[in-house]
Amino acid sequence: MKRRIAIFTDEPGWHGARLREAFAARGCESRFVSLAECRLQMAGEPPVVRIPGFEPELPDGAFVRGVPPGTLEEVIFHLNVLHALQAIGIPVYNDGRAIERSVDKAITTLKLAQAGLPVPATWVTRDPVHAWSVMLKEHMAGHTLVCKPLFGSQGEGVVRIGPDTPLPDSEPYNGVYYLQRYLDSGEGKWHDWRVLVVGGRAVAAMRREGNGWISNVARGARCRAAELDDTLRTLAETATAAVGMHYAGVDLLRDTHGRWWLLEVNSIPAWRGLQGVCGVDIARTLADDFLRSVAGGAARLEAVG
């Protein structure tokens, strides 16, 4: 009997098509569905999660490619669907807890720091006076700061604060300042690294070379193949384990002094740019690891039963 896979996404696009092909090549049937269309029902025993296209039987597993934006209540509901599936024994990849940790830059940085990993000096506050004090002390010490949205991706809303730059208004950051010491990778030669970790193992890496100091592919950065040396591999794998993810896109930077730093760990990473420069079939690698987790979940359920 074919395994049935729910791929949670509102915009399947290129990544969804690659995943569907990979699952089909392994004899699985997959369907795209939005978390916004799902329902929770606690009326009788046992509690039920309703997923369009998977009624009356739930899928064998769920692969998360996107969580819809919305109000705080809407986002919590979307994550609650993932939590509920996990609670009733349906493997979720990555699960709701991992997504919660990674979407919140403060918690990601905290987890990495607790694991003893190199992260830039970071301050998170709602108090503009405290934020201004941090900025002043950093400038006096010869450092530049970066202000980022607590929740955000692809470099949107990220600004660099130099000695002649005023502290941004807190409103665009929803009242929370996430301030981080700027790390110089080489003025005019800006670059960083993205490592993809799947099933606890680093499988591919690339160097991203930016037109500006933000080296995101979505902002025009060029992708170059990169060797997965021991340092990159160890840092990326340890970071992924620290935040508890099945798979992750780990962003790293080496400063002009040769020191490595961990910047972010992404729980729903894009990989189109990486696929173009590496020799690994990423969608198939993800599908294989996902199906191992589905098989493991089924085995655990049988053992409990």
Image (cartoon, rainbow, N blue to C red):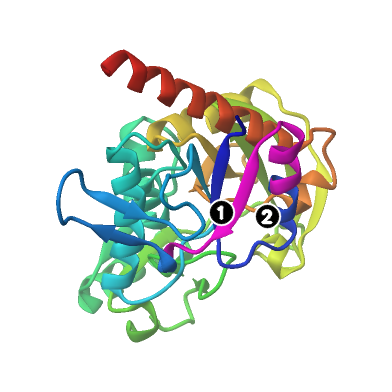
Label 1 packing within 10 angstroms: few (<14), some (14-19), many (20+):
many
Q: For this view, does 241 lie left or right of residue 170?
A: right
Q: Residue furthest left?
A: 44
Q: Which residue is mark 2?
A: 16
From which residue to which does the magenta span run? 20-35
Q: Is the C terminus in the top left, top right, bottom left or bottom right quadrant?
A: top left
Which numbered disc flags the more N-terminal residue, 1 or 2? 2
User: Vertical placement of 181 versus 296: above or below?
Assistant: below
Is disc 1 placed on a helix, strand or loop? loop
Q: For this view, does 33 lie left or right of residue 30?
A: left
Structural distance between the alpha carbons of marks 1 and 2:
8 Å
User: Vertical placement of 277 versus 300: above or below?
Assistant: below
Residue 277 appears in which quarter of the rendering? top right
Give the amino acid at mark 2. Gly
Q: Are marks 1 and 2 in contact (CB under 8 Å)?
A: yes
Q: Nearer the viewer, residue 26 or 72?
A: 26
Q: Nearer the viewer, residue 41 or 120?
A: 41
Q: Which residue is mark 1?
A: 65
Q: Residue at x 16, y 56 (%)?
A: 43
Label 2 packing within 10 angstroms: few (<14), some (14-19), many (20+):
many
Q: Position of residue 150 (x, y in %)?
A: 38, 65
Give the amino acid at mark 1. Arg
Q: Residue furthest top?
A: 303
Q: Position of residue 298 (x, y in %)?
A: 42, 24
Q: Is the N terminus in the top left, top right, bottom left or bottom right quadrant?
A: top right
User: Vertical placement of 227 versus 261: above or below?
Assistant: above
Is disc 2 placed on a helix, strand or loop? helix
Magenta span contains residue 276: no
Marking on residue 143: none
Q: Position of residue 294 (x, y in %)?
A: 49, 29
